[in-house]
Image (cartoon, rainbow, N blue to C red):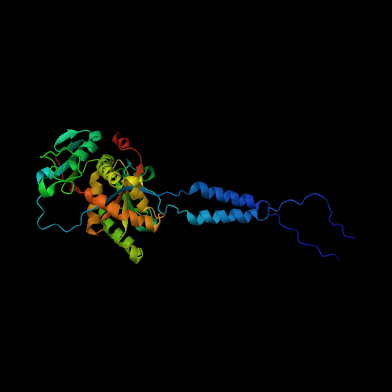
Amino acid sequence: MAKRAAPEVNAGSMADIAFLLLIFFLVTTTIETDSGLNRKLPPMEDQVDPPIIREKNIFTVLVSKNDQLLVEEELVDIADLRSLAISFLDNGGGVGDEACDYCQGERDETSSDNPDKAIISLKNDRETSYKVYIAVQNELVAAYNDLRNREFVRLYPNLGINFVEAQKQYDDPRTSADTSEDLKPKLDQVKSMYPQKLSEAESNKLN
Amino acid sequence: MSKFKKKKGGNLPAISTASLPDIVFMLLFFFMVATVMRDSTLMVVNKLPAADQIQKLDKKDRVMYIYAGKPSSRYQDKYGTSARIQLNDKFASVDEVGAFILAERASKRQELQNVLTTALKVDSDTKMGLIQDIKQELRKVQALKINYTTRVGDYTQNLN
């Protein structure tokens, strides 16, 4: 008696099934990396004696409850904020020890002494909307980035990149250790030339 | 005698596709492992504001997420339309934020506990009062590194 072989299961459609699953996963999953504005909050402990800061070294930005922008007590359009912030930070009006040799501003005596002293104070109302607040933050960060880009390109022209690109390269985990090592002091130097001094006061009820 | 004697044809044998499923399965497993599904379902409207001076938020294991915004339409009957905070899968009040951060921090590896970032995913139409309260809570638990998560775009998109 002939031994009957078990019929082979047709595996031809297996590939189709697997493809279907594959396409499902390809479509439904998103490899998304979030991005946003990094900020650092001030620590909680209140300072015993707040340092005395001269009025001319503070650049006040206030966003009202109606989302209007008051810069140094004047109503301005948000499109002008970046250039106003740059001219404040880059003013370099100080003399002697406080002079700023790399600043290209107007050296106005009534504006900031040097970028290290210059502080941007951002205030908002509880009724301010988040999107406007982010727009303002974005423009202030942009002002710092513009200045840092300028200095980075001036100091290291042979790298062929600006500060933001260099920072991105430094943050990228794929960048080799040598390159990161090389970039770090350069980035730190430019950061110390224009340190980000952005103070966010606790919002108070503004009538 | 056998009925099933194979014919010895002269034509080329067909290329075997038996290993095709294996290859596809390999790809499938790769994608299943490599992709991260969003672990919490959004219960709030979450249209992020736009910004262009942004930095990437790499390394998902170092990030804690806080969502805020108006409850989405199917929760509005129950929770109303004023902006709420969402932590993990449920709505929370402001004073639960601190406990949430501490719990999240404790669940991370020791060496990561000092480098954690809190990502604030807040809807663009939220009022700053709520965010101010969250920030105050974060300061209380020393979670000082924050990230206002935005989408990529020009700031003028926020102004209408």
In percent of width and height, residue A201 lies at 17, 48
Quadrant assignment, res A128: top left
x, y (%) of residue B75? 36, 46
What is the quadrant of the C terminus of chain B in the image? Answer: top left
Q: Residue furthest right?
A: B1
How many marks can you see?
Answer: 0
User: In front: A138, or B28?
Assistant: A138
Residue A36 appears in view: yes
Q: For the N terminus of chain B, which image quadrant?
A: bottom right
Q: Measured along the vertical axis of the image, is residue B141 above or below residue A149? A: below
Instruction: Work out whether residue A64 can be spotted.
Output: no
Q: Quick one: A137 or A142, which is closer to the camera? A: A142
Residue A120 occupies which quadrant of the picture? Answer: top left
In the image, residue A45 lies at what x, y percent? 16, 59
Q: Position of residue A44 (x, y in %)?
A: 19, 57
Left or right side of A31 for B153: left
